[in-house]
């Protein structure tokens, strides 16, 4: 049954070892670097209980009669997808920003396993049974579920056995209770999540069909032997009035150390089976890419809003050159929207009986959203103008010695007084120009996978036969050419 925000906070107080800035964190729910995101995730839980948003965030399961989270439900029809999109939009509207890792995107990786049960059954039917059980637990227990993909990797020109084997997470031994793993993973939001789908990041295990690196499992984030070493956060570095996004929406990334962590057999999803590992990498984002790209749509809205308010306040919105730039931003935004809408309208039945977004439209939409993001950010910077990088901080706007001058030069008219203009410029700076903005740009580029993998997904899912058949007919080619396709 859906949890409350306070139940989520309590679930994080499990004694996990967390480090940031050389300091061990006593309580992740109250530490200033983590509290903003913990509070946002808690807010998501609470929205499922409040009358105004309950029906958007949750549904009543006909089998149990209990409410469950819309985000966790495996999609079986178009209504499920429309409900998921509405729930994500409701969250992003409520919190007033963009958070990528809150679980609605990463749970989709588990649904991909439903489509690979025949592969898992080749290893051991127990593993596919584990998948079914964990899907049900995700639906009904409502954990904060994240993804563990990227290893440190080390020297990628070498195989794992040619360097420190811990550079890729691997199994070191088996016990009666399960497997013991060692290595490390980079995981966003790991320090304040409940569980992670942990799997290989690359198929770098040679030709060994029984590789100890080909392992996937559900990780309980409170497991003994885990150590969380986090990057420095943006929250608290500077006043929230000057950096409103960095102080609220920084998702802390973590190097999770697996110091001989035991994974119970019931949590193992595949093990020592390279085909299963390869399948997972190829289909990992079959569902999860939708919620990820939906964030880019909201980010486009924020850029358009910040840019448009900036040109309106200075009376520039009627200039043709300004309108052209705004229209370019709008085309980017609507391009993402069209791919998301089309991917659901033409959704396909998956091998496991779920309804997956049209894969070609979804993956090409991801390319559009990610590959053009840096250009759109620069366009928005142009529209906001140079003052987003030279405006003084709020303290200067309030100090008696400097306030009169800043009031004079930052007030435009009775509608745009200095304080409102300062707030808008500070927001645009944090959205487009700050350390936080640069981090988000890089994060969006690599959060699901690097650009070459995005294009590889398009190559695997685009219908190449259609153009081939069209040109064969139009050019009058003989049937003999079909042999060249084999």
Image (tube, rainbow, N blue to C red):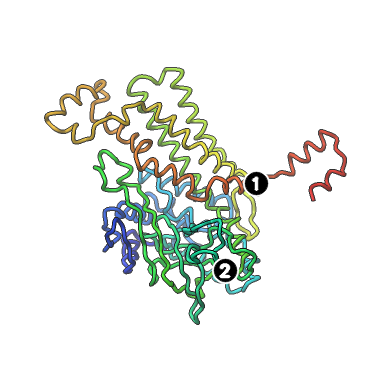
Q: Residue furthest top?
A: 319
Q: Secondary structure at mark 1?
A: helix
Quadrant housing residue 310: top left
Q: Determine whether, in the image, residue 247 is placed left or right of residue 73.
A: left
Specify whether 410 is left or right of 68: left
Name the quadrant containing residue 384.
Answer: top left
SS state under label 2: strand
Return the residue at label 2: 270
Name which residue lies at 63% across and 59% down: 353
Of label 1 and label 2, which has the lower sequence position?
2
Q: Could you tell me if the residues under marks 1 and 2 are in contact, i.e. CB atoms within 8 Å?
A: no
Relative image position of residue 367 (x, y in whole percent):
55, 41
User: Disc 1 versus disc 2: distance between alpha carbons?
Assistant: 26 Å
Tell me where residue 89 appears, x and y as whole percent.
44, 45
Q: Locate residue 277 relative to residue 466 in the image: left or right.
A: left
In this rendering, the answer to whether 36 lies above or below 379 is below
Quadrant of the image for the N terminus?
A: bottom left
Identify the residue position indicated by label 1 in the image.
Answer: 459
Taking 318 as reference, is 109 left or right?
right
């Amino acid at each position: 049954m859906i949890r409350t925000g306070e139940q989520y906070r309590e679930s994080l107080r499990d004694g996990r070892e967390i480090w940031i800035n050389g300091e061990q964190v006593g309580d992740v729910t109250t530490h200033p670097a983590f509290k903003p995101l913990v509070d946002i995730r808690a807010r998501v839980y609470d929205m499922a209980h409040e009358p105004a948003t309950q029906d958007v965030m949750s549904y009543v399961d006909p089998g149990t009669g209990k409410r469950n989270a819309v985000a966790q439900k495996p999609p079986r029809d178009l209504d499920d997808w429309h409900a998921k999109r509405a729930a994500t939009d409701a969250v992003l509207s409520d919190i007033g920003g963009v958070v990528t890792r809150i679980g609605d995107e990463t749970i989709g990786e588990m649904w991909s396993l439903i489509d690979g049960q025949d592969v898992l059954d080749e290893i051991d039917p127990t593993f596919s049974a584990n998948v079914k059980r964990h899907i049900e637990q995700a639906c009904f227990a409502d954990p904060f579920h994240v993804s563990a993909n990227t290893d440190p990797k080390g020297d990628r020109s070498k195989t794992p056995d040619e360097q420190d084997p811990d550079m890729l997470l691997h199994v070191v031994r088996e016990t009666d209770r399960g497997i013991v793993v060692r290595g490390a993973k980079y995981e966003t939001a790991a320090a304040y999540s409940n569980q992670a789908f942990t799997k290989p990041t690359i198929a770098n295990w040679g030709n060994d069909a029984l590789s100890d690196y080909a392992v996937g499992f559900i990780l309980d984030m409170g497991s003994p032997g885990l150590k969380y070493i986090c990057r420095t956060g943006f929250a608290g570095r500077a006043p929230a009035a000057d950096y409103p996004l960095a102080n609220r929406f920084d998702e802390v990334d973590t190097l999770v150390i697996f110091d001989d962590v035991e994974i119970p057999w019931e949590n193992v999803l595949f093990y020592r089976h390279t085909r299963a590992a390869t399948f997972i990498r190829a289909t990992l984002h079959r569902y999860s890419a939708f919620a990820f790209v939906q964030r880019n749509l909201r980010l486009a809205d924020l850029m358009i809003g910040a840019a448009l308010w900036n040109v309106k306040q200075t009376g520039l919105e009627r200039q043709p050159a300004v309108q052209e730039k705004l229209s370019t931003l709008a085309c980017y935004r609507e391009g993402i929207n069209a791919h998301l809408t089309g991917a659901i309208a033409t959704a396909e039945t998956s091998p496991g009986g779920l309804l997956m977004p049209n894969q070609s439209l979804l993956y090409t939409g991801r390319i559009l959203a990610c590959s053009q993001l840096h250009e759109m950010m620069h366009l928005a910077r142009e529209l906001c103008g140079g003052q987003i990088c030279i405006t003084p901080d709020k303290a200067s706007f309030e100090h008696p010695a400097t306030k009169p001058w800043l009031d004079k030069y930052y007030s435009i008219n009775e509608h745009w007084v200095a304080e409102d203009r300062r707030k808008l410029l500070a927001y645009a700076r944090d959205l487009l120009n700050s350390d936080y903005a640069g981090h988000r740009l890089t994060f969006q580029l690599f959060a699901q996978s690097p650009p070459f993998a995005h294009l590889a997904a398009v190559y695997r899912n685009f219908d190449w036969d259609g153009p081939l058949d069209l040109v064969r007919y139009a050019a009058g080619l003989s049937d003999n050419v079909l042999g060249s396709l084999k």
